[in-house]
Image: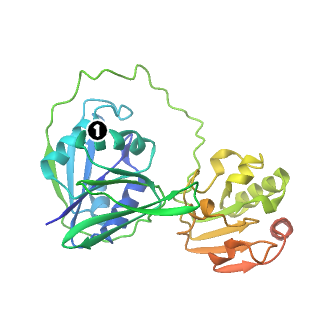
Amino acid sequence: MAEILLYIECDENKILDASYDLITGVKKNNKGANVSGVIVLHPDFILDDEIKNNLKKFGLDKLYVLKSEKPFFEKAEEPFLISGIIKNINPEIFVLLSSTTGREIAPIIASILDTGLTADCTKIEIENIEGKLKLISTRPTFGGKLMASIICKKNPQMATVRVGTFKKEELNNENLEIVEFNFPSFLNLKSEIIEYKKNEKSEFINFQNAKMVFAGGLGLKNKENFDKLKLLCEKTGAIMGATRKAVDKGFAEKKYQIGQTGSSTTPEIYVAFGISGAIHHIMGMENSKKVIAINLDKNAPIFKYADIGYIEDAAKVLDELLNGLN
């Protein structure tokens, strides 16, 4: 049977939630293939029953386990370990998250395996074409003006997928098979990390698990209104977002940026305050469950993606909402 392999990414002693999202997204579109994962365990990582049950719950069929003698933050040998297992099992497709680690190791793996790689995809589909499993990877091109769908000619067909592209669901696969591989650790790599310091003051905005996102664009006019938007988020439990142009104007920090060159998000509710709806922003939030758009321009592209549209000054609506919460 055809096999799709996913990179299951770890951070310290846990699996990233986005890896569970990836499992669900691919499993729902697997065209009858086995959906397997490969995980590299560092010395302090324990593959306990809770993790195994989560992998089952979100749909994984098989887990290949590789062990590394390096700490969790040292990724230099992972491409070689993963390439070794891919050569052993010959999956048709190999998919990674477009995370910091995914972006680091994916090109090295593709080079070792002499195959193609479609990077930073906003959408992937798996199709059966002439009896062969094909990965159709979609990503922005020409500065976000066009979306290109790409098919790799060689196996494994590889892609990195943006965090937030999928949302995990309980698929309850009870038959998880675990296979351990014992490749030698690569102790003579030419580079090593001498010291690791964790940044306790994280600048990361957790868009991935957001239930509500309130995002602002140039229609909010100034930084003062973005400060009001941040206050509204604090009062309602939403997470603040911003468009690239609003960030470029200095209305919000880069960490709040949603879109092609920012973060992706798939909340239950996405409220767009004064956002026109340029394609490079849309690709970061188009999978939101419900979109509410507030804009003075009745012809703004954002209304094409909105479930509810409100033609009004976004700054005025923001003031009314804050007054209503006082």
Label 1 CA crowd tier, 10 Å (few <14, some 14–19, many 20+): some
Q: Is residue 80 visible?
A: yes
Question: In the rendered image, which quarter is residue 36 located in?
Answer: bottom left
- Identity of the amino acid at label 1? Pro
From the top left corner, tell me how far across and down residue 78 is, in percent.
29, 37
From the top left corner, tell me how far across and down residue 119 is, in percent.
42, 51
Question: In the rendered image, which quarter is residue 236 located in?
Answer: bottom right
Residue at the spot 83% in from the left edge and 56% down from the top edge:
225
From the top left corner, tell me how far across and down residue 205 is, in percent.
59, 49
Left/right placement of residue 24 relative to residue 255 reads: left
Instruction: Say which residue label 1 marks.
Output: 79
Q: How many marks?
A: 1
Residue closest to the eye, 247 or 256:
247
In the depicted structure, whether residue 55 falls above or below residue 179? below
Left/right placement of residue 190 relative to residue 177 reads: right
Residue at the spot 75% in from the left edge and 76% down from the top edge:
299
Left/right placement of residue 266 relative to residue 183 reads: right
From the top left corner, tell me how far across and down residue 208 is, in percent.
51, 57
Residue closest to the eye, 303 or 53:
303
Locate the N terminus by quadrant. Answer: bottom left
Residue at the spot 35% in from the left edge and 44% down from the top edge:
106
